[in-house]
Amino acid sequence: MKIGFIGLGNMGAPMAANLAQHHDVTGFDPTATPDGLTLTDSAAAAAKDADVVITMLPDGNILRNVADQIHTAMKPGAVHLDCSTVDVQSARAVAAQAETHGLHAIDAPVSGGTVGATNGTLTFMAGGPQAAFDTVKPLFDIMGQKAVHCGASGNGQAAKICNNMILGVTMIATCEAFALADKLGLDRQAMFDVVSTSSGSSWSMNTYCPAPGIGPVSPADNGYKPGFAAELMLKDLRLSQIAAASADADTPMGQAATALYTQFVEAEDGRGKDFSAMLPRFEKRTHS
């Protein structure tokens, strides 16, 4: 395939590099110029004559702006594959716009972070027509280890937002529980051995344990340098609350998690740290 790739940051650059081992990839980013990729001077130039144009962008407004630039440059029948994490409404608006230009659109946000992007082990949650999903499935197989077709346009974003709302809530609960266990005199290893094999087990505990030296290696063992930054978790939690408001859904735990990560990132020292750095935050706090 001939592929245009727009957005070559920490996630996009390694994804594009993996694709370039198998396909003809032309990339564009207004600031990043990663080595080893063929680059152009505009998003429209990267999209011209491509079979698939992939976007990996920071937010819905930027996605809409880039879509305006590339949809008129893409050839009829091409696929716009957006791997950004954005609001559901933006994903659906971009898909509808693509249709008016005779294009197909898939929204497919990813899970797996920069390590998954580099190693080609991402998980994709995809929304859009089945035929378009089938067209880009070989690309998912290069960039990741799993791709789930979640239904109509926007449903990929819905799946990502719901998943990360669960993740934010469970990480807070896991960090709270470790801080409480410390103050009750319970050894952290004993805490992990019980919870990881009991009803309190979760991905936050078993795979991404926020306590240094406990469980599999995680960012906690590297000074909480981000695998998934707290400000990115905050972004996703805010998207969950935008979605909840638009769908008239009651999400009190998601709302509480959003408030806690807002405080952690914007009023404390959480920016630039992994989202699991909530544990040292709770260690320093007292019951009020």
Image (cartoon, rainbow, N blue to C red):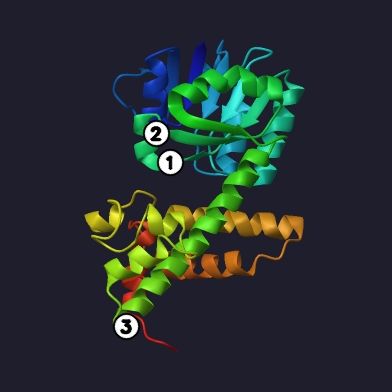
Contact, mark 2 vs mark 1 (Cβ under 8 Å): yes
* Left or right: 68 in relation to 197: right
Could you say where residue 224 lies in the image, as x and y percent from the top left? 28, 58
On screen, 8 above or below 263?
Answer: above
Of the two numbered discs 1 and 3 on the same chain, state the one appearing first in sequence: 1
Q: Residues within 10 Å of mark 2 (few under 14, many from 20)?
A: many
What distance separates the C-alpha of mark 1 from that of mark 3?
Answer: 33 Å
Identify the residue position indicated by label 1 in the image: 112
Task: Give the camera-side residue of 34 and 186.
Answer: 186
| Residue 93 numbered tag | none
**Residue at (34, 72) in percent of width and height:** 281
* Amino acid type, mark 1: Gly
Contact, mark 3 vs mark 2 (Cβ under 8 Å): no
On screen, 137 above or below 49?
Answer: below
Q: Is residue 39 visible?
A: no
Contact, mark 1 vs mark 3 (Cβ under 8 Å): no
Quarter of the image that includes the C terminus: bottom left
Of the two numbered discs 2 and 1 on the same chain, state the one appearing first in sequence: 1
Identify the residue position indicated by label 3 in the image: 183
Q: Nearer the viewer, mark 1 or mark 3?
A: 3
What is the secondary structure assignment of the residue under circle 1? loop
What is the secondary structure assignment of the residue under circle 2? helix
**Residue at (59, 34) in percent of width and height:** 148
On screen, 204 above or below 115?
Answer: below
Identify the residue position indicated by label 2 in the image: 117
